[in-house]
Structure formats: structure tokens, C-alpha cells
Amino acid sequence: MTVSEPTSRAPRPRGSSLAGKAYWAMVRRVTLIAGAIDVGYIVLFAGLGASTLAWINGVSVLLYAAAYALIGRKKNTLALLLIWFEVMAHAALGSLLIGWDSGFHYFLLLFVPAIVVANSRGLAPAIVLGLLAYYLGLKAVCDAVGPLTPLSPAGLRTVFWVHVCLVFAMSASIAAFYRRAILSAERRLVEQAQTDGLTGLCNRLGFQTQAALTLARQPDAGGSAAVLLGDVDHFKQVNDRYGHAAGDQVLIHVARILQSHARQGDVLARWGGEEFLLLMPGCSPEQAEQAAERIRQAVVASRVAVDELELPLSLSLGVACLGPGESLQSAISRADAALYDSKRAGRNRVSRAWPAALPA
């Protein structure tokens, strides 16, 4: 069905919250990958005879394992400090020991997108400039000191190409992760924009979007389509006498009843205030009127618990079927007129407004 399960009102996640969750999920993932890479480095540098670098990578594995565990415990700041320390120290030691041409410094560049995304308290520009100063300073020191424990030319080329491939792969992985996070956040925002925050049903925008898609498939499905517009009777009195919290419970309760009577493929929405709108594709006039009557009877038979009271409810409905070539808005307008007929006739009833082309 097009409709989601009605829920009570809950705060919607803010954009900053979504970005924060995506950022820390990315950091934890990169931490795991980096630790696995350092395990491979232990083997690589041991094979190249660079035992000092092999031991350094062993320490790096332990640091990444600690950072991974800290993020899992929500100790994000300490974890981030460990990661910064590891990457900056590792880049410096590797570059000093076997030379700038080894490419250890490339890993410092992976910090830049993470810094910009995190943008903690607007400090991203200052942190990026600090990282640039460290990068350029390390280059100057390496030029002045030279490699302390140089590798053979073949070994140095091997390390360089390994670093280039790893940095490209990690950059692509980080970019792909952020793309998925952005698309996911965009889908959530679209859903929120089209969902009523109280009942969890479609709002007007959501209804119009889903209804347009449903009716676009209608010629292939065959049959007519009907709209049911319902209004909770004496709703203002519930709000005035029992408070808006009780009114909210009434709306959620009625939304659940409507959803239980909607079919797969129907489009159900909170149309505004205490009004609900149901589009039923492939539904004859008789079926639509019968469905409306079943909904009305279900609402009357139910009760809403408010404090120690059980409030009786009733629902007035207007039903209209789309005539040949008629727009959905025109049918909704006729259903609205039929709804007011039900109100004027004493409420708690179903009225219909068929177009001239349909049987009365």
C-alpha cells in the first residue's frame, strides 16, 4: 500500500544530525580499512627489509583497533585524536625513513574531505590550513634530512605504487560512501516533505505525487477510480474539552482505521485538519460507497481512550468517482461537496456525488 503505518509525533532528524551520523559511520569504516591495510604493510616492509616500518605498522594496527572500539562506544573525540596522531606520525616517520618519494604523505590528503564535511564549529578552514602547513613543513624536513634508512630503487618504486593505488581506492570509497549518504538523506527529506508528521500518512503533497503516479497507471489497469473524503465529526469539541493531545489521539486512531480498510495500491492521506482523503483506483461507484460505509461503521464502533474516558467517534464521508476525462481535483471537489451534504444532513453518514456519466 502507498500508506505507511500511522505513528505518534516524533522530532524529525535535523540535517546536521544526519550529516554527523554519516560522518562517524564513514570514519569507523575507514578506520577498519586502514587497520587492515597496515596488516598488509607489516608483511610488505618485512619483505623489503624495512623492519622499523614493519614495527611502526604493527603499532598502527593497535591504534586503529582502539579508535574503532572508541567510536563504537561513542567516544568519538578520543578516537579522532588517535586517528589523527596515527596518520600524521605514520606519514612523517615513513617519509623520513625511506624518503618523500615513497608517497606516505598522500595519506594526509585524505583528511581534507573529512575535515570539510565535519566542519566542527566552523573551524574547517583553520584546520585545513594547519594541515597544509604540516604537509609543507614535512616536505621541507625530508628535503633537508633525506631518507634515514633508504630502500633500494625497486623497493621504493613498489612502495610508491602501492601508496598511489591505495589512496585512489580509499578516495573512491570515501566519495562513494558520501554519495550514498547524500542520496539516503535526500530520500528521507523527500519522505518527510510528503508525510504528515502526526499520523504517518501522506500529506497533500505526498497524496498528489502518489495519486498522479497511480492514475498514470490507471489506463493499463482498467476500471474507474473513486475518492473518499472523510471528516471527523465534532472534532473541535474534542480539542476544546479534552485538549489537543486528545485530538491528536483521535486523528491517529481514525488514520489507523482508514489504513486497515485501504487496499493495496490505494492512496491515503491526511488532507488537512481532521479531514482524510482516500483514492481507490479500479473501484466502481457501488464498491466505493460500500467501502465508505464500512469505514463509517468501523469508526462508530470504535472508542478512543483519553485519560480514564473512552470517547465515541463518528465520521462523515463524501464519495465521488472520476468521470471520463475528469481531473482528480474536480472529483475531490465533488467529494467535498458530498461531504458537506453529509454534515448538513446530521453527520455520521455517507453522501455521494457521481458525475452525470455514471448511474445515480
Image (cartoon, rainbow, N blue to C red):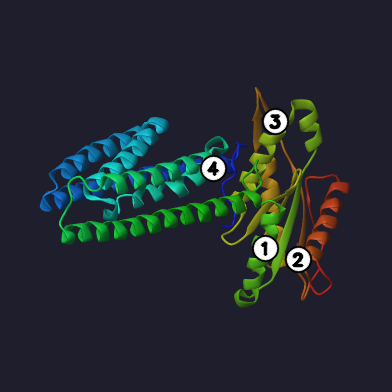
Residue 320, percent from left and from top: 77, 62
Hey, which quadrant is residue 187 in on the image?
Answer: bottom right
Among the two numbered marks 2 and 3 on one chain, the one whose residue lies closer to the N terminus? 3
- The crowd level at tag 2 (other Cα within 10 Å; few <14, some 14-19, many 20+) is many
Among the two numbered marks 2 and 1 on one chain, the one whose residue lies closer to the N terminus? 1
Residue 27 falls left or right of residue 253: left
- Of circles 4 and 2, which is in front? 4
The reply to whether callout 4 and callout 1 are in contact (CB within 8 Å) is no
Looking at the rendered structure, the kind of residue marked 4 is Pro
Determine if residue 64 is in view: yes
Which numbered circle lies on residue 125? Answer: 4
Looking at the rendered structure, the kind of residue marked 3 is Ala
> According to the image, label 2 marks what residue?
328
Cα–Cα gap, marks 4 and 3 = 50 Å
Instruction: From this view, report whether residue 217 is shown above or below residue 131.
Output: below
Residue 5 falls left or right of residue 131: right
Q: In this rendered view, identify the residue nearer to me: 308 or 326.
A: 326
Among the two numbered marks 4 and 3 on one chain, the one whose residue lies closer to the N terminus? 4
Which numbered circle lies on residue 246? Answer: 3
Cα–Cα gap, marks 4 and 2 = 52 Å
The reply to whether callout 2 and callout 1 are in contact (CB within 8 Å) is yes
> According to the image, label 1 marks what residue?
211
Looking at the rendered structure, the kind of residue marked 1 is Ala
Q: Secondary structure at mark 2?
A: helix
Q: Secondary structure at mark 3?
A: helix
Residue 44 falls left or right of residue 285: left
Looking at the rendered structure, the kind of residue marked 2 is Leu
